[in-house]
Amino acid sequence: MDKKRGFTLVELLVVIAIIAVLMAILMPALSRVREQGKRVVCLNNMKQLALSWILYADDYEGDIMNGDGGHDHGKEKAWVGKCWDNYQAGISLAEDLQKAAIQSGAMWPYAGDLGLYKCPTGKRGELLTYTVMDSMNAFPQPGNTRGRGDVAHLIVKNRNRMKSPPMRIVFIDEGWVTPDSFAVHSNQPKWWDNPTVRHGDGTCFGFADGHSEWWKWKGLETILAGRKGDLKYIPNILTPNTPEGKEDLLAIQKSCWWKLNYTPN
């Protein structure tokens, strides 16, 4: 009788070990590719929102929409309605209520697709992960002063009178969205809202000329603070100490306010 020789136990263990090594090598690469794909979708979302924001301004003689999420300014309807239940705990409203809030906003007639308001990296149950910057007709935070008044004089109300639109951030992929708009100090070298870390060690932005970009943070302290802030609410989390961390903050401050009320070190 012919004897058919099969694999020995040792040979099977060797094959399994080789497969495990290959998986360990390939999985991080596959994860990076998947995250890069999500980044592409996020950048497209931000671009579409920025272009829709411009269309709104064109319809209203350059006046931009209210960027204070969830809060109307007199006759100025907020760009989206309130989508959060308990901001500090990171709890969103039920999805049907979030949907209604987004559809009630000033942006909806110009960007009527729910998928545009959420980054693919968003958590289950989140329909809104994007926020408008404070300076874009949004919410000037109390205490963000220059010694002789608040930042009202830096708030952009009309796109036609804005300085350097290609350099000015309108939308930020924040993830855990703030209860109004993304706050940035204008008068001191300190973060107000936490830096956000999305799609790697950076985040996506939509600009006032309609383009979008992903910025990679240069400072390790920026990245670590952003990761920590994604887990729970931490107010006034970071005053940068490194040159790279200071450069990250200054880039956001200038892109938000354009003109700062302090002299950077």
Image: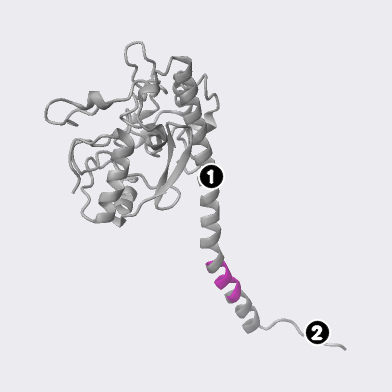
Q: In which quarter of the image is the N terminus?
A: bottom right
**187 vs 103, nearest the viewer:** 187
Q: Residue 40 carries which label?
A: 1
Q: In this view, does 246 lie to the left or right of 51?
A: left
Q: Position of residue 54 (x, y in %)?
A: 47, 25
Q: Residue furthest left?
A: 147
Q: In this view, does 40 lie to the left or right of 175?
A: right
Q: At label 1, which amino acid type do we have?
A: Val
Q: How far apart are marks 1 and 2 (CA)?
A: 53 Å
> Would you say the residues marked 1 and 2 are in contact, meaning their CB atoms lie under 8 Å apart?
no
Residue on which disc 2 sits: 4
Choose top left, top right, bottom left or bottom right for residue 186.
top left
N-term mark: 1 or 2: 2
Residue 109 is tagged as: none
Q: What residue type is labelled 2?
A: Lys
Q: Which of 150 and 68 lies nearest the eye of the viewer?
A: 150
Q: Is the magenta stretch mostly helix, strand or loop?
A: helix
